Amino acid sequence: MSLEPATVRRIAKLARIRVEDDEIAPLQTQLNAMLDYVAQLGGVDITGVEPLSGGAQMAMRLREDTMCDGAIAEQILANAPDRAGEFFAVPKVIE
């Protein structure tokens, strides 16, 4: 499948992307390459492959829901440009 310049302009307009006239040809080439790749995927043999309707069917491994400080507060605060005790110090933004 090959896109025409008018189609590329329409796609750009629908995507609300400003495209200059000199950018149409490279964009057309890139879009055609993408469409060719998608067409190649249509030729893949998928016999015997079960369709996946979503990840919700998979059993989730759960961990115990506990609260902790991570035990690395000092390491984290060592990266702070300014600190006040055990907290990050930030400039006042509301008067």
Image (cartoon, helix red, strand yellow):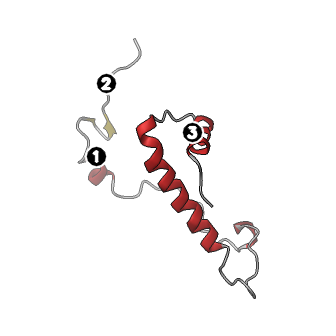
Per the image, the residue denoted by label 3 is 9
Instruction: Please give left or right for residue 48 compared with residue 75 in the image.
Output: right
Does residue 4 sit above or below 9 in this rendering? below
Residue 61 visible? The answer is no
Name the secondary structure under disc 1.
helix
Mark 2 vs mark 1: in front: 2
Residue closest to the eye, 73 or 18:
18
Could you say where residue 43 lies in the image, as x and y percent from the top left? 66, 78
Q: Check the image and name the residue furthest to the bottom.
A: 48
Per the image, the residue denoted by label 2 is 91
Does residue 62 sit above or below 23 in this rendering? below
At label 1, the amino acid type is Leu
Residue 14 visible? The answer is yes
Could you say where residue 72 lies in the image, as x and y percent from the top left? 33, 57
Name the secondary structure under disc 2.
loop
At label 2, the amino acid type is Pro
Instruction: Please give left or right for residue 55 compared with residue 37 in the image.
Output: right
Disc tally is 3
Q: CA distance from mark 2 to mark 1?
A: 16 Å
Residue shown at the point (74%, 66%) measured from the top left: 56
- Residue count near mark 2 (Cα–Cα under 10 Å), binned few <14, some 14–19, many ≥20: few
Q: CA distance from mark 1 to mark 3?
A: 51 Å
- Sequence-earlier tag: 2 or 1: 1
Per the image, the residue denoted by label 1 is 77
Instruction: Please give left or right for residue 38 compared with residue 90 in the image.
Output: right
- Sequence-earlier tag: 1 or 3: 3
Residue closest to the eye, 37 or 76:
37
Q: Check the image and name the residue furthest to the top.
A: 95
